Image: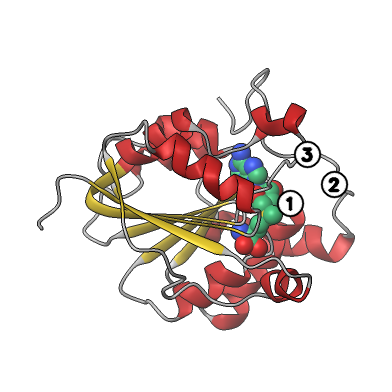
Amino acid sequence: MNGFPAREIRSYARRERPLGDAAKAARERLWGRLAIADHEWHRLGEGSREVVLDIGFGDGESLLTLAAGDSARDYVGVEVYRAGLVKVLRGIEQAGLANVRVIEADVQVLLRQIPDGRIGAVQVFFPDPWPKTRHHKRRLVQSPFLREVARILRPGGVLHMATDWAPYADAMLEAASSVPALTLGEEGRGARPWTRFERRGLRLGQAARDLRFTKRGGAT
Ligand SMILES: C[S@@+](CC[C@H](N)C(=O)[O-])C[C@H]1O[C@@H](n2cnc3c(N)ncnc32)[C@H](O)[C@@H]1O
């Protein structure tokens, strides 16, 4: 098994340049210590510490900032973008963070390996919006994805999504309405850090919308 599906529709475009020598060297040096291999995925969240899963962390700005301020929880980031993965490996090393690890995979493949109710929180910040109608099928956040996220969340666990593409936010709400295990909470960014990407969007008039859901079954 590996972390990439053979034929499924992909929510990402694979158009990456090869890593440069310095990035390759950093990857080789840090991968064994900081990446979670596929045979370990089924063990995610089995310990006593709560796990936060960051899906599609990009350059990892939010992931590293949140993890640095939240040492009581473990952060696991999943990405397909190799340059982003290396950036985060370096960021973890530079900041001396002990609570962040990464997974290189299509999250659709990863989710299937995680047992029910193991994850404390899932964050999906600015998933690729795929604005053209003919590309909507490539959007990550659709009902089957949300059902899988609800399955791996512990009761009372939180799913936090953010997008600056208004029609995608509507589509997320619509998709979530067919997942009874998820209850919509109040909107608002909460602790989500400001990133360069989001500031640039805001300057172009694209304000982000944050949607938060709770997995049913937690204490009320
Ligand atoms: C627009 S970027 C957002 C990055 C980051 N979360 C942020 O807030 O800046 C979306 C990221 O999701 C990743 N991605 C898309 N589909 C994915 C998948 N199926 N599995 C893992 N990562 C995925 C892409 O590689 C990309 O880096």
Distance from mark 1 CB to nearest ligand 1 atom below 8 Å: no
**Where does label 2 land, which residue?**
16
Measured from the top left, where is residue 105 in percent x and y?
A: 60, 40
What residue is at 27 percent from the left and 36 percent from the top? 116
Measured from the top left, where is residue 75 in percent x and y?
A: 43, 62
**Where does label 3 land, which residue?**
13
SS class of the residue under badge 1? helix
Nearest the eye: 35 or 198? 198
Nearest the eye: 92 or 11? 11
Q: Is residue 104 visible?
A: no
Q: Is residue 63 visible?
A: yes
- Which image quadrant for residue 195? bottom right
SS class of the residue under badge 3? loop
Name the side, left or right, on which 219 lies relative to 33. Answer: left
Disc 3/disc 1 C-alpha distance (Å): 12 Å
Q: Quadrant of the C terminus?
A: bottom left
Which residue type does callout 3 highlight?
A: Ala
